[in-house]
Amino acid sequence: MSATRSRNTDWKKSLQQVLDRQRMLELAVEREPGADEGVDIIWRSQMLALHDNMIEVESPSAIGRTIKLREGVKLNAAFVVGQNRFAFRTSILPKPPHFPHSLSLFLAQPESIERCHRKHDRFDLQGLQLPKATLWTLTDPRSVSLAERANELAFEAVSRGENAVPDADHSMMPELGAPIEGTLMNVSGGGVGIQFAPSEAAAISRNRSFWIRIAMGKANPVPIVCRGKLLHTHIDSMQNTYAGIVFDFSFNPAHQKTVAAQIALYVERVQAKKIIPR
């Protein structure tokens, strides 16, 4: 893990700052070292409490659906305090007996935390391979239905073990403007956070409705596609534009189930290899 210095003595103080300021923890299931067939998805979860021997956070969710993470799964975690980003490794603990009905996730406290250094125009992400996201301006939002249906059929075929070539028929694509490329930084309850280089900032600020394509790696060949609405943007300390985008299924409500299923399948595949033996 790349970092400028260890924070062994101050980790509890730093996490207490996150809790006091009602900030989020970023969580990603730790994949096998050297694995190149997949990508890493980061979830943003509210920190709820700092107990004597564990950290309590909201269970990650996507599109209103709780992401099921198994006991013993190892995670990469990170948080931001001021202009600094810190990271640590943890694992999912059994639910404590005195929290029998809690929907929270309980994490092992870290042995140490480390401050991430900046690498070129972004923070080092401890080897995480974040998905690439492509956005196009939607010239006609109603034109997404056919493309979403084609994506649903491709995902169903792959789920049955058949071959499918998504995006092959460009005649099914919505009516689009020019594409811009970004990096999927996180997934939240109803949308995504995508980071763009300074050169793409103007295209983001001029539009509000987009067609989104998120590549999920070789292990998940069917990308996530759907319409998205821009909620907010901000420019970080390295002049990158961060865009918060909410998924919009207004013209094809059934497509919401496909996107949720794609995310659920990704989670099942990646965490199946990361259970700590008991």
Image (cartoon, grey):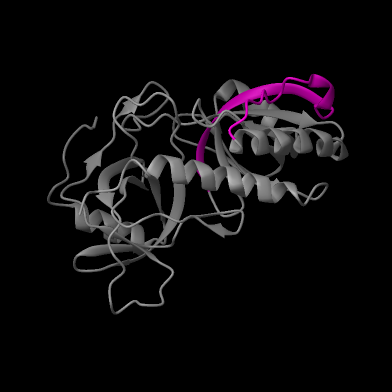
The question of residue 167 being in magenta is answered with yes
Q: Residue furthest bottom?
A: 98
**Residue at left offset 21%, top offset 45%:** 113
Instruction: Out of 267 and 278, give the one closest to the viewer.
Output: 278
Q: Would you say residue 156 is visible in this rendering? A: yes
Query: Residue 103, relative to residue 274: is it above or below?
Result: below
Q: Quadrant of the N terminus?
A: top left
Q: Give the percent coordinates (x, y) of residue 235.
A: 53, 36
Instruction: Out of 229 and 120, give the one closest to the viewer.
Output: 229
Q: Quadrant of the C terminus?
A: bottom left
Q: Give the percent coordinates (x, y) of residue 13.
A: 22, 58
Q: Give the percent coordinates (x, y) of residue 101.
A: 41, 77
The reply, left or right, for residue 166 in relation to residue 133 is: right
Query: Residue 135, relative to residue 91: is it above or below?
Result: above
The reply, left or right, for residue 135 in relation to residue 142 is: left
**Residue at left offset 76%, top offset 37%:** 148
Magenta extent: 161-187
**Residue at left offset 41%, top offset 40%:** 270
Q: Give the percent coordinates (x, y) of residue 165.
A: 67, 23
Q: Would you say residue 231 is visible in this rendering? A: no
Q: Looking at the image, how many numbered discs can be counted on the residues?
A: 0
Splitting the image into 4 quarters, where does residue 22 fall?
Answer: bottom left
The question of residue 67 being in magenta is answered with no
Splitting the image into 4 quarters, where does residue 38 fall?
Answer: top left
Query: Residue 155, relative to residue 62: is it above or below?
Result: above
Q: Residue furthest left?
A: 9
Instruction: Out of 94 and 177, give the one closest to the viewer.
Output: 94
**Residue at left offset 76%, top offset 50%:** 254
The reply, left or right, for residue 77 in relation to residue 236 is: left
